[in-house]
Image (cartoon, rainbow, N blue to C red):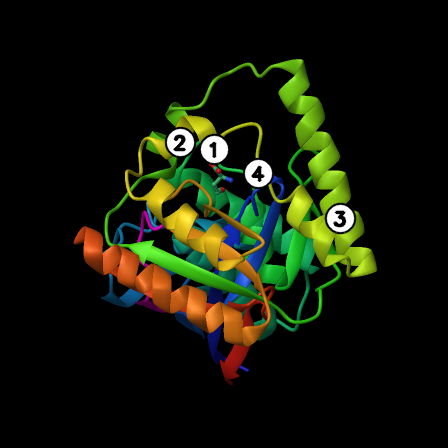
Amino acid sequence: MKEIKVFSPASVSNISCGFDVLGFAMEGLGDIISLKKIDKKGVFIKNISGFNIPLDVKKNTATVALLAFLEKLDYSYGFEISIEKNIKPGSGLGSSAASAAGSVYAANMILGEPFTLNQLVEFAMQGELISSESAPADNIASSLFGGIVLVDNFTKYKVINLPIPQDIFAVIHHPLISVSTSESRNQLPNKVLLKNASDQLTNIASFVHSLHTNNIDLMKLSLNDHLVQNQREDLFPYFKKIKNISNEMGSLCCSISGSGPSIFSLVSGYKLAEKIKLDIDKGFIKMGVKFNSYLSTFGSQGARVLQF
Ligand code: HSE
């Protein structure tokens, strides 16, 4: 096999109670990566369509990830890459991660899978770190593994896929403004109160238990953040109004996706999710904020082959 086309999904990280360690893959939005193995050594960009991203292979998250991948191999060949960039950079939906994850996933498939998905996370992270120096692997792990992930950022990004609960949907709104992950992370304190850390621990443990037991009431109780959301909310003036709409309609949570500006609600039942999406749409229209919105399964498939 010399050529491949893959889809690499957008993702929502943090999931309220899991700052930097939880994430899930989205349905219906993602980048498309076409990769061709060539005789010339190195990595070359053939074409980029959609949103603008760097054309310099040392600054583009996908090509930096590919170079990290190749460095681990004794190689005499190269790759030519084309990217359909469908996820807006600075959306809080794992845009840089999706391109980086998709490119190493494609390279691995072309070469007959010499690496595990966990190893691919390490290569893709080299790309992710180009766009944000302190980025964790929550979005990369979501795009590569799919479903709902828990990632350990300290031990070579070990990833665990958590159970997907029945009949839970994600309503995602992307207001069309850009916020860089570094900018949003700069707002965060270096220290947190012990009480807040303890509350966060309770929530994440309860959340993981709720997934294993499909306990929706416990899930709702656990979907709260005690570490970062307060500091970030002011960056997004629409957030509180939208959260009220979502909560009043009966969502399980409404929270910032990753470092923002996108926000997401988790909802039990498809019909209610449709209603909540529509009401939040109306809320944004009323505030005069342009947006895109999505209704996704809570934990969709990860990077996948579209065409050999
Ligand atoms: N989890 C990160 C944050 C963003 O909240 O800053 C994505 O890696």
Q: Is residue 89 magenta?
A: yes
Asked if the residue under mark 2 is in contact with the one under mark 3, i.e. CB atoms within 8 Å, the reply is: no
- Is 242 left or right of 290, judged from the image as shown? right
Query: Neighbour class for label 3 at 10 Å: few (<14), some, many (≥20)?
Result: some
**What range of the chain is rendered magenta?**
82-91
Q: Which mark is residue 298?
A: none
Find disc 2 in the rendering and name its residue.
232
| Between marks 4 and 1 in the image, the one whose residue lies nearer the viewer | 1
Q: Disc 4 beta carbon < 8 A from ligand 1? A: yes
Q: Disc 2 beta carbon < 8 A from ligand 1? A: yes
Q: Earlier in the sequence, mark 1 or mark 3?
A: 3
Specify the quadrant of the image occupied by residue 49: bottom left
Query: Neighbour class for label 2 at 10 Å: few (<14), some, many (≥20)?
Result: some
Can residue 155 be seen at all in this image of the molecule?
A: no
Residue furthest to the front: 248
Residue at the spot x=67%, y=68% of the render?
A: 113
| Between marks 3 and 4 in the image, the one whose residue lies nearer the viewer | 3
Q: In the image, residue 248 lies at what x, y percent?
A: 47, 53
The amino acid type found where label 3 is placed reads: Val
Find disc 3 in the rendering and name its residue.
208
Residue furthest to the right: 213
Marks 4 and 2, how far apart at CA = 14 Å
